[in-house]
Image (cartoon, coloured by chain):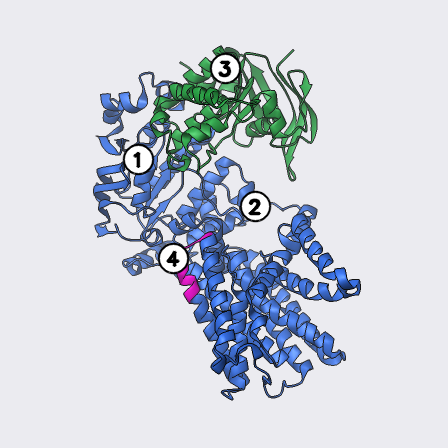
Chain colours: A green, B blue
Amino acid sequence: MALLELENVVAAYGNIRALQGLTLAVEEGEIVALLGANGAGKSTTLRVISGLMPPQSGMLRFAGRSIGGLSPGAIVKLGVAHVPEGRRVFPGLTVRENIILGGSNRERPGRAELEADAEKMFGVFPEIKPFEAALGWTLSGGQQQMVAIARGLMSKPKLLLLDEPSLGLAPLIVQQVYRVIADIRRDGTTVLLVEQNAHMALSVADRGYVLETGQLVVHGKPEALWDNEDVRTAYLGGRRT
Amino acid sequence: MSASALSGKTPRGAAGRRGLALGLYVAAALAAIAAVLVIPLSAYSLNLLMQAATYAIAVLGLTIVLGYTGQINLAQAAFFGLGAYSVALGTTAFALPFWIALAIGVLIAAGAGAVLGLTSLRLGGHYLAMVTISFQTILTLVLTNWVAFTRGPDGVPNIRRPVLLAESGPYLGLCIAALFAVAWFVWRLKTTKLGRAMQAVRDNELAANVVGVDAYATKVAAFTLSALLGGFGGALFAGGFAYVSPDQFSFAESVVFLTMVLLGGAAAPPGAVLGTGLLILLPEWLRFLKVIYLAVYGGAVILIMVFMPDGIWGYAMTLWHKLRPERPFDPGFIAPLALTRETAREDGSVILSVHGLSKHFGGLKAVDEIDLTICRNTVHALIGPNGSGKTTLLNALNGIVRPTGGIIKLEGVDVTRLPPHRRAGLGLGRTFQNIRLFGAMSVLDNVMVGAEQPHPLPTLPRERGRVNRNTLPRLRGRVGKGAGGLERHALAALDFVGIAARAGARVGSLSYGHQRLVEIARALAGRPKLLFLDEPGAGLNHVEKDELVRLLKRLKGHGLTIFIIDHDMAMVEQVADHITVLNFGKRIADGTPSEVLRHPEVIVAYLGEERPALSRSHGAS
């Protein structure tokens, strides 16, 4: 049984249908990439899964349990962490506080345990360690992105939803973030990833789904997607090396 | 060929509809006045209507300052009181004619409003609200305690009305006429240059500044107008009731005014009138409930606020838009746009030079002694690790942050001390890393704000002549006088980036990529010479990035100079003529792409060894 299953999910912003009957599945331990143009419904898919946006119809199951209509808080408790696009770091809290807050879903976490896990996050992202006492808003965009990912990892999720983790990051840091994503999976976390940077995403993903106007166009293993001429020119871009 | 002929029939049709609407509106006003003159009303009804009409005028002032400009004013009763006491003391102690006393009251209130607005230079949000409360308190104390002048708590009786309007019926007619006129003015204000500037300040003050809006002056204007209307309402109120006392203009009344505008809806004049009418009539209707009527009244207000957070009018508008989905915008024929004040000339001359620029935040040297030269009509890229000071440098260049040291010269003119809106007027445009649009306004209005700049260039007259000979649609002035010319100019900017069809949509409903394009169009509408783009490619997929690259090349072809920050090296390599690299606030490399991207220090600090973006992405084909 897949860890996450979506079946015929429909979601809309007002009159505009963002998802028109989307069906997809993520197996335990996989990295799955969601690809497609702006407005294709990729971020909406993540928002529906994490409960930020209620679906109009369709079925969502996580670890065998229906999660359609549950509150975001309840879904986090089940082990789904969402790192949204645009960072959303708490501006008035320090970096360390931001990261520790990511552990809020745990049952009665000990202070020492949280501190130790936060320290691990600084091991993953040594760039932000010097700023651990700085307020969130003082960080540059890329540093905030690292804090946001670290905060998501703090909930020790079974499923991590990452929305554009490479957005606004220097090439060196993008490579590092993707190494971290690969490490996260090795530690047993399943990852559902939204990316514009198809090359990067497919370099770590086990499978990719390509969306267009809220519907699934094609899915498959990275090699299969690359080998499909139409898919490559329309959705992935350029050539592969 | 005239400007209106070029743009097709849309403006004329709009003008015709506007004329019809004005006709209907005047007819409604006349009908309302005739009704109160003809129908015999009890003294009680007359008083209620008089109170409602004069209060509504003051509440319309709050529509401007709160609804349009987003500033809190908790002293509207004080301005109301200034107007009222001017008429009260003017027509009694000083024996002035009513109209003179009214004019004095309006001027005093407007002057006080301007002074209060001036404090918004250093204060915003709840601090500004506290200043207005203090002002309110001071005025109440003066009215109560300066007995020799204001007659203290006893108040001022026997206030006179104007000759010919001494009877209550005709005087109420005057108040209603004034209300209709003020409501029309406030309604029209929204679509003027000042009105758009107010909404821009409300939605995003920083962005308003960089597209050329003087946010401070706009806020002062909003406070002045709001206070002026408060004083006007108060002056009419004093004449209506023939008696005023300090307790009528207390802080509690200011809260009532604020509740009225929020309850009815602060976004448009009908909300102010609805809210005022409701809060004045509701207690009267509920009087049959005797002892519990105040509790029911309070409960009703709370329920409305909970279920209609945008007020009654806002709620009605939401329903209306649901019933009538937005039609796709048909811009008709769009005249091409003169994008810049420049012609293409890649002659190696310098457009922007920076010497020893520093910005320190406490001990952190975010930008440290940077030298930079940007040549005219080139694409100059700024790259560097996250946190290396790229955005801070950009903010210093266009005036959002004040540099700790150094000199910035735009075309040889020292602009280091100029505020952002003045630099926009001199030809600096920019977009933001985290998109900053005016979220509650339409796409078109967003770009129109960018199109109107208050500060003409010193060199403009010569340029204006040249531009106008080449561009027929803008025969009158820089972008054509009046909203019609602005609208065409804004549409042309939207057309240039390829999203004119979405001009009528609320900007918040657009996708991320489209919002980026709107931001670029807004900057282009200001006809910049030098355009700063902060990560324009972030969040775009490869197809959109290819479009962006083509757009940048077209812009360069039009003579624009572009200074761009981005992390997509494939894109940067495609468009950049020159690259500057920052690390820890210092410049570590500067030169052509081929030099800089092979620079060992750049590879170690920024690119990394693998350089996957370069070898794999669309730029490599």
Based on the picture, tell me whether residue B124 belongs to the magenta stretch: yes
Q: Circles 2 and 4: CB distance less than 8 Å?
A: no
Query: Which label belongs to residue B505?
Result: 2
Question: On the picture, is A195 further left or further right than B298?
Answer: left
Query: How far is the residue under mark 3 from the one under mark 2?
Result: 37 Å
| Tag shown at residue B389 | 1
**Mark 1–mark 4 distance (CA, rounded to whole Å):** 27 Å
Q: Quadrant of residue B266?
A: bottom right
Chain under disc 2: B
Dot 4 amino acid type: Leu
Residue B246: x and y in percent read 55, 73
Q: Secondary structure at mark 1?
A: loop
Q: Which residues are magenta?
A: B115-125
Circle 3 Cα neighbour tier, 10 Å, few/some/many (<14 / 14–19 / ≥20): many
Q: Which residue is mark 3?
A: A205
User: Could you tell me how far apart the alpha carbons at marks 2 and 4 are, in whole angstroms?
Assistant: 33 Å
Whichever of labels 2 and 1 marks the residue nearer the N terminus, that label is 1
Q: Are marks 3 and 2 on the same chain?
A: no
Q: Is residue A115 visible?
A: yes
**Amino acid type assigned to the residue bearing label 1 in the image:** Gly
- Label 3 amino acid? Ala
B274 falls in the magenta region: no
Q: Crowding near pointer 2: few (<14 within 10 Å), some, many (20+)?
A: some
Pick whichever of labels 1 and 4 is earlier in the sequence.
4
User: Residue flagged by tag 2: what amino acid is it?
Assistant: Ala
Q: Secondary structure at mark 2?
A: loop
Q: Chain of mark 1?
A: B
* Label 4: chain letter: B
Q: Are marks 3 and 2 in contact (CB under 8 Å)?
A: no
Mark 1 against mark 4, which lies toward the viewer?
4
| Mark drawn on residue B121 | 4
